[in-house]
Image (cartoon, rainbow, N blue to C red):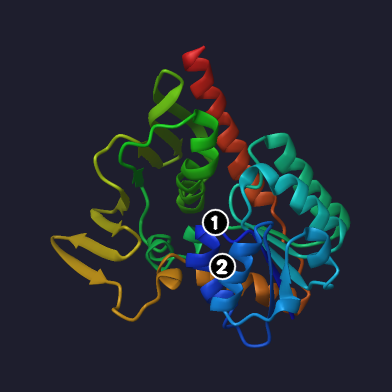
Amino acid sequence: MKVGCIGLGDIAQKAYLPVLAFQPGVELHLQTRTPATLDRVAEGLHIPPERRHTTLDSLLAADLDAAFVHAPTLVHPEIVTRLLEAGVPTYVDKPLAYRLEDSARLVALSEERDVSLAVGFNRRHAPGYTQCADHPRELILMQKNRIGLPEEPRSMILDDFIHVVDTLRFLVPGEVDDVTVRARVRDGLLHHLVLQLAGDGFTALGVMNRLSGSAEEILEVSGQDTKRQVVNLAEVVDHKGQPTVRRRGDWVPVARQRGIEQAVLAFLDAVRAGRVLSARDALETHELCERVVRAVQDRTA
């Protein structure tokens, strides 16, 4: 199976390439416009020169069976369009695009061409979070905080808060009938954001504070007088009277802990089996993110 990786930034090097490069039966091809980066990364993975590409045209000429896109978000629409039009099953690091109309167009194109399109919402595969899906979920609280990093609202919401939005959508136990957004914006920069989703018998809260003094991610689900807490995707604490702590094993790779390995393997398994994956559910997350963006913009207009 010939698999292309487009974009060789931090997320590709730290998370995806360590998984892809050592999969049996995968012939990995790399593409970036920066020759020095291409050669450095390829040498580290022992990838021969004929599988190194500085243009998308060259990569597509390799007759790919699948592709992973980790290029900057701004160029996702152009790259993904080329891949889908060439009939290449495509996995894209979130988000599909900054603009909802571009994301909707890409999903429609994948359906029109009957080609797989998957978006990298790895938390749906992270072991600690999948365990929360089996727990009572009357109240869901997710915090994803940063240190000294206020940002322009659209880029912050689509590049980072989208993980919170998608995780809440993944975990809510029923249909959402109420959406509430609260935010603090100063001088055009988003400092903190709160999203509430509510439905029959449940409430879900997503919080991001870019001036929190701590880089952390905490998920809590509770119901029926019990609570499960996941700290930084690595530590699971069950509360029912005395807390019980389960920590990530010393030899568990970070990519597996964060669900990236599982997401990659699920995508490759679908390609091998000839199953076409739809990004329609991922588009619903993008639609909710657009609703959050507009709510923030309305509050600052």
Q: Position of residue 17 (x, y in %)?
A: 56, 71
- The amino acid beneath tag 1 is Phe
Q: Is residue 261 left or right of residue 24?
A: left
Q: Position of residue 293 (x, y in %)?
A: 54, 28
**Disc 2 to disc 1, how far (Cα)?**
8 Å
- Residue at position x 75%, y 52% from top? 79
Residue 292 in view here? no
Q: Earlier in the sequence, mark 2 or mark 1?
A: 1
Q: Mark on residue 181?
A: none
Q: Is residue 291 above or below residue 12?
A: above
Q: Is residue 153 above or below residue 297?
A: below
Q: Secondary structure at mark 1?
A: loop
Q: Mark on residue 263?
A: 2
Q: Position of residue 195 (x, y in %)?
A: 43, 34
Pick the residue in front: 277 or 211.
Answer: 211
Q: Residue furthest front?
A: 36
Q: Mark on residue 121?
A: 1
Q: Position of residue 285 (x, y in %)?
A: 58, 44
Q: Is residue 190 left or right of residue 251?
A: right
Quadrant containing the N terminus is bottom right
The mark tally for this picture is 2
Q: Quadrant of residue 287?
A: top right
Q: Is residue 19 above or below residue 220?
A: below
The reply to whether discs 2 and 1 touch (Cβ–Cβ < 8 Å) is: yes
- Residue at position x 24%, y 57% from top? 226
- Residue at position x 79%, y 72% from top? 64
